[in-house]
Image: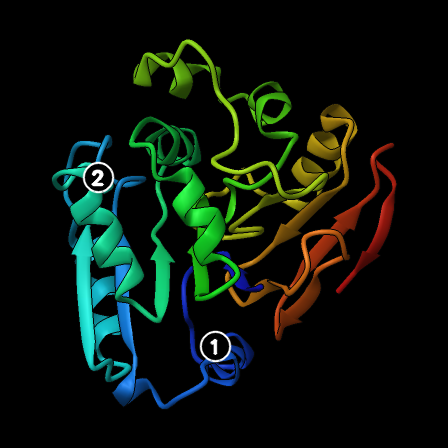
Amino acid sequence: MRMLLTSNGVQDGPVRDTLLDLLDKPVSASRTVVVLDAILPFPGDKTRLLQHLEQYRAMGWAECDLLTLFSGPASLVESRLRSADVIYGYGGTNHWLAHAWRQSGLAPVLRELLDEKVYVGASAGSMIFSRAHAAAVDALDDQEEVDMLRLDTVGPALPLFDWFLTAHLGAPYFSHTTDEWAQRTAARLGSPLWCIDDGSALLVRDSAVEPEVVSDGHWLHFDSAGNLVDSR
């Protein structure tokens, strides 16, 4: 596996450097596809999305495709996923993104591609692989979002990890994501929790092994009892 689970996408610094190291060829010879499903349920201005996409495109990809998992027949979407060297799961609602992978029938394809491609997650795109997904609804007070999406059940796109990840620790645009909030969330979750800021990411090479922290920022790691294990 070559999974880079970020808080805020591919920012300059160690996160970007790690992505370049994960590629087996130059960016200029690599193709990427951005999966947009997580952001689409939210109405309103998408300027920030466009800015992020332009920043990502400007890395110099040979091809930068955009799709949703319902862009057409599943076979067509699958072929576009398979043609990419990097699959980029953009942020938004992790509950809808996980649902979209399952509902489209493409979750088994994703599992196969995780062993072949580089996967980059941004926020919600990083949060769809935990067995604690359903428990996190209560721990993160996400029930209102689940109700908005009219999801009868929630769960991961793929149940790969026993731990859960939250993004944007200390971000000014999510003022509630303080260290104290992280501590309360960890105590409620009942599973190991990683909380990372926008300068951090987790690198996963084996789903059965603890992830590697990639960071020049702030992060917290809690155990299943809500105790702080490590931090920076």
Which colour style is shown? rainbow
Q: Quadrant of the N terminus?
A: bottom right
Q: Quadrant of the C terminus?
A: bottom right
State the mark number for residue 74: 2
Q: What residue type is labelled 1?
A: Leu
State the mark number for residue 19: 1
Q: What residue type is labelled 2?
A: Ala
Q: Can the viewer see residue 48?
A: no
When the figure is inspected, residue 62 is found, relative to residue 157, above or below; the finding is below
Mark 2, secondary structure of its residue: helix
When the figure is inspected, residue 110 is found, relative to residue 185, above or below; the finding is below
Query: Residue 48 sits in which quadrant?
Result: bottom left
When the figure is inspected, residue 58 is found, relative to residue 76, above or below; the finding is below
Q: Residue at x 14, y 41 (%)?
A: 71
What whole-number distance in Å separates the C-alpha atoms at marks 2 and 1?
Answer: 28 Å
Query: Residue 51 sits in which quadrant?
Result: bottom left
When the figure is inspected, residue 96 is found, relative to residue 216, above or below; the finding is above
Q: Position of residue 127 (x, y in %)?
A: 52, 43
Number of numbered discs overlaid on the protein picture: 2
Q: Residue at x 16, y 54 (%)?
A: 47
Q: Residue at x 28, y 69 (%)?
A: 32
